[in-house]
Image (tube, helix red, strand yellow):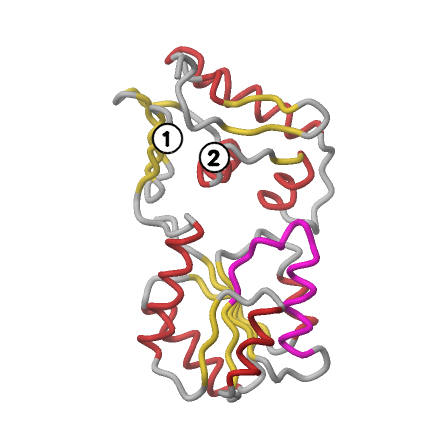
Amino acid sequence: MAINSILVVEDEPDILEMLRFNLHRAQFKVLPAVDSEEAIRLLEGPLPSVAIIDWMLPGMSGIELAKRIRSDHVTSELPIILLTARSAEEDKLQGFNFGIDDYITKPFSPQELIARVRALLRRSGSLQDGSINLNGIHLDTFAHAVSVEGNSVHLRPTEYRVLEIMMRHPNRAFQRGQLLDQVWGRKVYIDERTVDVHMMRIRNALKPYGKHHVIKTVRGIGYRLDDQPENA
């Protein structure tokens, strides 16, 4: 079953364990970090679906980490929830001005946090709800299966992941480097031409069903996936 991964950056062991336990029980994969430096290392791998960041961290603060995430083209759209004991309106406004998507004041209930996480995932189109349907292509995100009008389409795991990312963000032009970073992570060096090979394989797999045209080459940039039929 495909599940969303959540980056949790919290230096207090009891709170980190509480978050890990409750998120895991809610069927999320947890990537724990005790400071910003560890979080940055984790972000060099496949991207999580949401980041939960404590404001008061040792070394680089949570706000500074959020600013760094927003300034990096790979992580700039990562949804961020800020945890803090600060409840003043000016503190919340400061967080939102730095690109925070949501703000939870300590102490908080785990149920409220999980509800906020799910709301962010729905808004970003990243909630693993079982299926994605776009332009006649159906993705079963639990089974990692692709079909067109009931016909099974065979894709290798990496090709499936590339297609899933593009279907979650239709009409967005992806640079080859962006797809490499999101699928393989930045710790792995792979030539950008690898993306072209995977795109060719995806198109070939969709061609018997007349869906190969949904993946467009964007000259000088990379690729995008259209959400409208060819004759629309």
The front one of 221 and 59 is 221
Secondary structure at numbered mark 2:
loop
Q: Are discs 1 and 2 less than 8 Å apart at CB?
A: yes
Q: Which residue is mark 1?
A: 134
Pinpoint residue 171: horizontal percent, then vertical percent. 51, 32
Magenta residue span: 61-80
User: Amino acid type of disc 1?
Assistant: Leu
> In the picture shown, does residue 217 fall above or below 41?
above
Q: Which residue is mark 2?
A: 170
User: In the image, 58: left or right of 204?
Assistant: right
Q: Earlier in the sequence, mark 1 or mark 2?
A: 1
Pinpoint residue 191: horizontal percent, then vertical percent. 74, 33
Q: Residue at x 65, y 41 (%)?
A: 178
Furthest toward the left, the residue is 150
Q: Residue at x 62, y 62 (%)?
A: 42
Tell me how far mark 1 sits from mark 2, CA to CA.
8 Å
User: In the image, 80: left or right of 58?
Assistant: left
Question: Which quadrant of the view contains residue 218?
Answer: top right
Q: Residue at x 68, y 84 (%)?
A: 58
